[in-house]
Image (tube, rainbow, N blue to C red):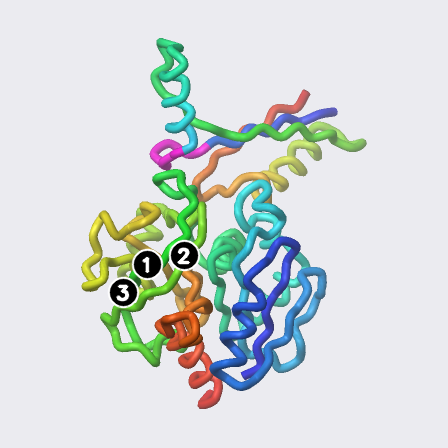
Amino acid sequence: MKARVTVTLKTGVLDPQGKAIEGALKSLGIDGIGSVRQGKVFDLEIGDMDKVAAEAAVKAACEKLLANTVVENYRIELV
Amino acid sequence: MKAAVLVFPGSNRERDIAYALELTSGVKPALVWHADSELPAGTDLVVLPGGFSYGDYLRCGAIAARATIMDAVRRHAARGGLVLGVCNGFQILCEAGLLPGVLMRNAQLKFIARNVHLKVERSDTPFTRRYNAGAVIEVPVAHGEGNFIADAETLRRIEDEGRVLFRYCDASGAVTPAANINGATNAIAGIVSENRRVLGMMPHPENHVDPAIGSTDGRGLFESLAEALQTA
């Protein structure tokens, strides 16, 4: 089993890196993109365990390390 | 004073901190490796120095905050022991949950390395007793992620409890948007824990302790600690 964790900044948290990327896209002449928020993606290989246990393990990983829940949200997908 | 300065892979200010501590207290601090599980017996001050622990991977301070030695630091703090985190050390303390909030990328996206002015908000702490409340000191900063953020409720609590020890200000002590170098909420440069025994700050007082450098404005912080621990 594999898990993909997506970590994004919470709404309202200033993302200067996203803003800089937004500016660069504009200067490339790519139109139609309103705004950019930068996040992170983690691909995890899960060991031998059932789906419920895997979900619990990945959730613990997110809460304890992968995301700083003060400013970030995370989303888990098991595949 | 029996101080322990933690060393993580990528720390680079541990010698500056050690120099400042020895200069002001006369006692050489122990340098403690991140993989150790205990602090030296009798440690009464733990310092987390600046640098780029673990190359700032994941988030600044995130990996160091989960290092083995940090369990001992948590026990030390829970006992009411003194802890000082400077720059990356402040980031580590926030990531470890010993201080609230997060240090985000500087609002202007630039790494800032220069002298700044700080307003000392209060003098009744073990870190600032040698300063007068309202004093303005000049010390260097060197960081790319020093933009302090906390949720509204946490922020209100920190302010209501008077836990902001240092704010970015101009030379006259006025806290202005222009003086807020990294865009930190409420121009916060340093905060303490609820019991006022854990301090995290972005600027580097340890670099202004020797007259040879041209300023000794940061010396008061280390003299405060030496004095607090002498009379403790």
Magenta run includes residue B200: no
- Secondary structure at numbered mark 2: strand
Disc 1 target residue: B116
Disc 2 target residue: B141
Magenta run includes residue A14: yes
Q: How far apart are marks 2 and 3 (CA)?
A: 14 Å
Specify the quadrant that holds the C terminus of chain A: top right
**Mark 3 vs mark 1: in front:** 1
Disc 3 target residue: B119
Q: Residue at x 63, y 26 (%)?
A: A4
Residue A72 vertical position relative to residue B90 in the rendered view, above or below: above
Q: Residue at x 64, y 35 (%)?
A: A58
Q: Which residue is drawn at 40% across and 56% down?
A: B141
Q: Earlier in the sequence, mark 2 or mark 3?
A: 3
Instruction: Give the class, few, some or many, for how many residues have Cα within 10 Å of label 3's Cα (few <14, many ≥20).
Output: many
Q: Which stretch is magenta?
A: A9-16
Chain of the residue where label 1 is placed in the rendered structure: B
- Secondary structure at numbered mark 3: strand
Q: Distance between the residues labelled 1 and 2?
A: 7 Å
Residue B231 vertical position relative to residue B73 in the rendered view, above or below: below
Contact between labelled residues 2 and 1, with CB atoms less than 8 Å apart:
yes
Residue B163: assigned label? none
| Pointers 1 and 2 within a single chain | yes
- Secondary structure at numbered mark 1: strand
